[in-house]
Image: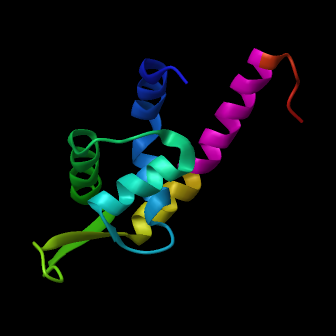
Amino acid sequence: MDTDRRAQWLRGVIDLCVLGALRDGESYGYEIARRLEAAGLGPVPGGTLYPVLLRLEKTGHVTADWRAGAGGPARKYYRISPQGRQTLADAGADWRRFTAGAGALMTGVATP
């Protein structure tokens, strides 16, 4: 996949993808980045991820707390808030409709 294209697409949905990565439980930045990459989004550098996490925290979509590391530095753990879950559900549904329409246009296959 073209990395410039992937980066452009990711900018539009990274907030939702991060919320989705936190849907099933709390996590810290490095692990969130690994989940995003494992989902096929490619590598997400810290310079991209941490501003997103800070923005989501400031808007109340995630909460966070620092915890002592086991033999290492402290880690900041993030968890999705009820507001974040609602945004993920609402915007996720909008995103699925949008991508279905875009896919239909690109492939010539009508959506139901």
| Residue lying farthest to the front in this orientation | 71
Picture colour scheme: rainbow
The residue sitting at 85% across, 31% down in the picture is: 111
- x%, y% of residue 35? 46, 57
Image position of 55 with respect to 42: above or below: below
The residue sitting at 88% across, 22% down in the picture is: 109
From the viewer's perspective, tell me whether residue 30 is left or right of residue 74. right
Q: Magenta residues?
A: 91-106
- x%, y% of residue 85? 48, 65
From the viewer's perspective, tell me whether residue 107 is left or right of residue 69. right
Q: Quadrant of the C terminus?
A: top right
Q: Main secondary structure of the magenta part?
A: helix
Image position of 59 with respect to 110: above or below: below
From the viewer's perspective, tell me whether residue 64 is left or right of residue 33. left
The residue sitting at 49% across, 67% down in the picture is: 23
- The residue closer to the viewer here, 71 or 100, is 71
Residue 89 falls in which quadrant of the image? bottom right
Query: Residue 96 lies in magenta, yes or no?
Result: yes
Query: Residue 68 lies in magenta, yes or no?
Result: no
- x%, y% of residue 105? 76, 17
- Can residue 30 be seen here? The reply is yes
Residue 110 falls in which quadrant of the image? top right
Image position of 34 with respect to 1: above or below: below
The residue sitting at 48% across, 20% down in the picture is: 5
